[in-house]
Image (cartoon, rainbow, N blue to C red):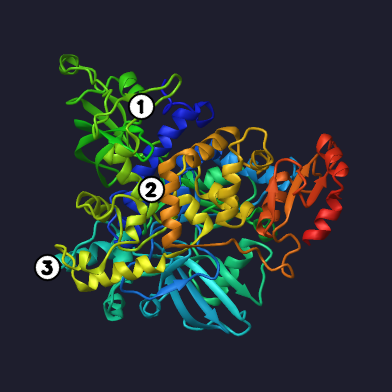
C-alpha cells in the first residue's frame, strides 16, 4: 500500500507535502479554463474532487498548506471585456464528500463545532447539484438591478443585460420584498436544448460546445445580449447573498418564499431529517441521473437552520454548513507514453505520466500525476504499459494500476533520476522522506521560475497579464531574474516584443503599478517561505502589524530562548518546524537582499484592525484555556478572529484577554500572576455579543 492508497490520517509529513505539490500543479491550469474560458479540460466533479483531497490533507497538516493551494481560492479572476462586480457577500465554493462515510463525518463535524447533544437532530436541506454557471441577482426595493457571475468568489462579471433575457429570472419581486436581496442560483441549459443548439451551430458553421455546462456559460457571457436571448437558458435558485430587511428561520423556508414569488427551485429539493433520508435521496438521484433533463454531478446538503449556519461560518473558500456529495467516477484504459519529472519551487521532483489521450467520464485525459518514486515502484509502472486511469475524489487523474502481461515484463523498469533534470544538481531523498529534492537552490532554473510564478500568483501579488507563460519567456530573455526585476520592467522593453504591442505594454505596466502597494499578508506569502501558506501569512501579518516589526522579530527570534522566539512560538498554529523555516529564510543573505530590493520599490501596507468602536476585540490577543461549555473551542476561536482578535496558544505579557473555563491550570495561574484580564465563558459571551 502506498501513501496514495492510504487515508490522509496515515500520511507522513513528507508524503503529505509531496502530494499537496502534485495536487496544486494539477489544478492550477484548470481554473482559468473552467471559470474564465468556458472550456474546461476536466469536469466540475473532477475539479471539486481534487480540491477535496487537497483540503483533507491540509486539515491534517495545516502547516504544509501551500500558497498556491486550491483551498485558498475560488474560481478565477473575471475575464476582460465585462465590468467587474465586487460581491457584497463572497460567493463561496463547496467542500465535497465522495462516500456515505464522509457525509456522516460532515454531520459529526457540525455537531462537534456547535457542541450539540448526540440526540439533537441535524436537519439537512438536500438538493441536486446542477452542473451550470453560478450567478448572483441583486434586487433593491424589489427591482432587479444587477446580475453577476461568481468569478473568483470576491469579484465577478457584470452580465446584467444578458440575465434579463432569461425567462426564469424575475425583473421585479412581489410587494413586501426586502430592501436588498441577492438571490443566488445556477444558470443551466437542458440536455435537449443543448443538442438542438449544437445542431444549429454545426449547420451554420458556428462553434459547437462540449457539454451543456459550457454551452450555458458561453451563452450567458456573450457580448451581445441578443445572442443570449436566442439561447434556451434556465435558472434554479438555491441561496442568498446580502439581505437587508428580511430573515428566514430555515433554508427550506427561504426556498419556499422564492417559489411563492415565482422563481424556479429544483423539484427534488427536500428536507432530510437524518442520514438515512439523505442516503435514500442520493441513491434515487444517482439512479435517475441519466433520465433527468439537465446535468447534475451530485447532491448538496445544507444545514437547514439559518442560526446554525451563521454560527458555523466558513473556512477559506467554503461554508462549514454545506457539503456536496459527488457521484462516483469512471475508469478507462490507455497507454503510458512517457514519464516526465517536474521540479517545483522548493526543489521537489514530481513524476507525471504522459498518456495516450483517453476519455474518462466525458473528459479527455492526457496526463496524470504519479506523486513520487515509491508510487511508481509499488505499481511497477513502466513506459509503454497499458494503464487503468481513474478520475475520482481521491486523486484526479491517477494511474490506478498497469496491466502486468508478457509485454510489461520485457520493458525496462523505470529508474527515478538521482539528478535534477533541469540543472543536473543532486536530487537527494532524506531519511523518511517520500520525495527527492534538487539541492541546486537558486542555481536551478526550474526552482527560480517556479518561485517567480509563485510571487505573481493569485493569492500573492496577482499581477494581471504576468502569468506562468510570461514569467518563463521573460526569464529566458533575461528581463526578469528575481522578483524585484518585475518592478524595473520598462515600457519599451515590452512593446517591441513579438506578440505584444503598445496596448499590451500599457496594460502590464498599469497592472504592475497597481501592485506597488501590497498588503503585508500578501507580501509575506509572495516571499515563498517554506510552510508559510495564505492562512499562516495572514496570521503573521495580523500578529506583527507591519513589515518592520515582523522583520525585526524574525531577526531577534534567531536567538534560542529569546523573548521574540517565545512570542513567535506562542502564535496559534506556529510550530517548531515552521519557526525553523522562518529563521532559515531570514538567515539566507540572498533572501534578505531580495526583501531589501522589494521594499525600495514597494509600499507594504500595515495591517488595519477593525475600528475599536465596531469591535471590542480589535487588535487584542486572546488565549483560551480550560473547557468551554456553551460553545466549542473552534467556534470561540472563529468568533474572536472574525472580530479582529489574534488567538494565541500561550500566555505572555502581550496577552490582552484570557478566557478560562473549568479545568484551566498553569495558563490561568500565569495569567493571574501577570495581572491579565481573565474572563469566564459568560463574560466572554457578553463581550462578543
Please tell me which of labels 1 and 2 falls first in the chain. 2
> Is 203 located above or below residue 277 in the figure?
below
Helix, strand or loop for disc 2: helix
Question: Where is residue 110 drawn, in percent x and y?
Answer: 65, 46
Please tell me which of labels 2 and 3 falls first in the chain. 2
At 61% from the left and 67% from the top, the residue drawn is 254
Residue 201 at least partly seen: yes
Q: Which mark is residue 205?
A: 3
Q: In 3D space, how far apart are the residues under numbered discs 3 and 1 (Cα atoms)?
A: 51 Å
At 46% from the left and 20% from the top, the residue drawn is 432
Q: Tell me whether circle 2 and circle 3 mark residues in contact (CB < 8 Å).
A: no
Q: In 3D space, how far apart are the residues under numbered discs 1 and 2 (Cα atoms)?
A: 27 Å
Q: Nearer the viewer, mark 2 or mark 3?
A: 2
* Classed neighbour count for the residue bearing mark 3: other residues with Cα under 10 Å, few (<14), some (14–19), many (≥20): few
Residue 290 at least partly seen: no
Q: Which residue is mark 1?
A: 436
Question: Where is residue 498 drawn, in percent x and y?
Answer: 14, 62
Task: Please identify the quadrant where the C terminus is shown.
Answer: bottom right
> Is 50 located above or below residue 543 in the figure?
above
Q: Which residue is mark 2?
A: 47
* Classed neighbour count for the residue bearing mark 2: other residues with Cα under 10 Å, few (<14), some (14–19), many (≥20): many
Question: Where is residue 92 drawn, in percent x and y?
Answer: 51, 58
Amino acid at each position: 500500500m502506498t501513501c496514495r492508497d492510504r487515508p490522509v490520517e496515515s500520511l507522513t509529513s513528507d508524503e503529505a507535502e509531496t502530494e499537496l505539490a502534485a495536487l496544486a500543479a494539477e489544478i492550477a491550469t484548470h481554473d482559468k479554463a473552467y471559470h474564465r474560458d468556458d472550456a474546461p479540460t476536466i469536469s466540475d466533479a473532477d475539479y471539486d474532487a481534487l480540491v477535496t483531497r487537497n483540503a483533507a490533507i491540509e486539515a491534517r497538516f495545516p502547516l504544509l498548506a501551500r500558497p498556491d493551494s486550491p483551498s485558498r481560492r475560488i474560481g478565477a479572476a473575471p475575464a476582460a471585456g465585462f465590468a467587474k462586480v465586487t460581491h457584497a457577500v463572497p460567493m463561496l465554493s463547496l467542500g465535497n464528500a465522495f462516500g456515505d462515510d464522509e457525509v456522516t463525518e460532515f454531520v459529526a463535524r457540525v455537531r462537534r463545532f456547535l457542541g450539540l447533544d448526540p440526540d439533537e437532530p441535524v436537519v439537512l436541506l438536500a438538493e441536486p447539484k446542477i452542473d451550470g454557471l453560478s450567478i448572483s441577482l441583486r434586487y433593491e426595493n424589489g427591482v432587479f438591478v444587477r446580475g453577476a457571475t461568481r468569478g473568483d468568489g470576491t469579484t465577478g462579471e457584470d452580465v446584467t443585460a444578458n440575465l434579463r433575457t432569461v425567462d426564469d429570472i424575475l425583473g421585479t419581486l412581489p410587494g413586501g420584498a426586502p430592501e436588498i436581496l441577492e438571490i443566488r442560483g445556477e444558470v443551466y441549459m437542458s440536455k435537449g436544448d443543448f443538442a438542438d443548439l449544437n445542431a444549429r451551430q454545426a449547420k451554420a458553421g458556428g462553434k459547437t460546445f462540449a457539454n451543456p455546462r459550457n454551452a450555458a456559460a458561453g451563452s450567458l457571457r456573450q457580448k451581445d445580449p441578443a445572442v443570449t436571448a436566442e439561447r434556451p437558458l434556465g435558472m434554479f435558485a438555491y441561496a442568498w447573498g446580502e439581505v437587508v430587511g428580511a430573515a428566514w428561520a430555515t433554508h427550506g423556508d427561504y426556498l419556499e418564499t422564492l417559489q411563492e414569488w415565482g422563481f424556479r427551485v429544483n423539484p427534488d429539493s427536500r428536507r432530510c431529517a437524518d442520514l438515512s433520508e439523505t442516503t435514500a435521496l442520493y441513491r434515487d438521484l444517482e439512479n435517475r441521473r441519466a433520465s433527468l433533463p439537465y446535468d447534475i454531478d451530485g447532491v448538496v446538503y445544507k444545514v437547514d437552520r439559518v442560526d446554525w449556519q451563521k454560527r458555523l461560518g466558513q473556512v477559506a473558500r467554503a461554508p462549514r454548513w454545506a457539503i456536496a456529495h459527488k457521484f462516483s467516477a469512471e475508469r478507462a484504459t490507455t497507454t503510458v507514453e512517457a514519464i516526465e519529472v517536474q521540479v517545483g519551487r522548493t526543489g521537489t521532483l514530481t513524476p507525471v505520466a504522459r498518456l495516450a489521450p483517453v476519455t474518462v467520464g466525458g473528459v479527455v485525459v492526457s496526463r496524470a500525476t504519479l506523486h513520487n518514486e515509491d508510487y511508481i515502484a509499488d505499481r511497477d509502472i513502466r513506459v509503454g504499459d497499458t494503464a487503468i486511469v481513474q478520475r475520482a475524489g481521491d486523486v484526479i487523474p491517477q494511474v490506478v494500476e498497469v496491466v502486468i502481461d508478457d509485454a510489461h515484463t520485457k520493458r525496462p523498469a523505470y529508474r527515478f533520476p538521482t539528478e535534477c533534470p533541469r540543472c543536473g544538481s543532486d536530487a537527494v531523498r532524506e531519511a523518511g522522506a517520500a520525495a527527492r529534492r534538487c539541492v541546486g537552490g537558486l542555481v536551478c532554473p526550474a526552482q527560480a521560475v517556479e518561485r517567480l510564478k509563485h510571487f505573481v500568483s493569485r493569492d500573492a501579488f496577482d499581477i494581471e497579464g504576468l502569468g506562468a507563460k510570461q514569467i518563463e519567456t521573460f526569464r529566458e530573455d533575461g528581463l526578469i531574474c528575481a522578483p524585484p526585476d518585475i518592478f524595473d520592467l520598462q515600457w519599451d522593453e515590452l512593446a517591441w516584443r513579438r506578440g505584444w504591442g503598445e496596448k499590451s505594454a500599457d496594460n502590464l505596466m498599469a497592472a504592475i503599478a497597481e501592485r506597488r502597494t501590497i498588503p503585508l499578508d500578501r507580501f509575506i506569502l509572495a516571499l515563498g517561505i517554506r510552510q508559510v501558506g495564505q492562512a499562516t501569512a495572514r496570521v503573521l501579518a495580523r500578529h506583527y502589524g507591519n513589515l518592520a516589526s515582523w522583520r525585526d522579530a524574525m531577526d531577534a527570534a534567531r536567538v534560542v530562548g529569546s523573548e521574540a522566539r517565545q512570542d513567535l512560538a506562542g502564535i496559534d498554529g506556529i510550530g517548531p518546524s515552521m519557526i525553523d523555516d522562518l529563521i532559515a529564510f531570514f538567515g539566507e543573505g540572498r533572501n534578505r537582499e531580495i526583501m531589501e530590493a522589494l521594499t525600495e520599490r514597494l509600499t507594504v501596507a500595515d495591517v488595519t484592525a477593525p475600528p475599536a468602536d465596531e469591535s471590542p476585540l480589535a487588535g487584542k490577543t486572546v488565549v483560551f484555556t480550560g473547557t468551554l461549555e456553551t460553545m466549542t473551542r473552534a467556534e470561540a476561536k472563529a468568533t474572536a478572529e472574525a472580530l479582529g482578535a489574534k488567538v494565541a496558544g500561550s500566555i505572555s505579557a502581550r496577552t490582552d484577554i484570557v478566557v478560562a473555563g473549568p479545568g484551566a491550570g498553569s495558563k490561568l495561574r500565569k495569567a493571574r500572576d501577570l495581572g491579565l484580564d481573565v474572563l469566564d465563558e459568560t463574560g466572554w459571551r457578553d463581550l462578543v455579543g
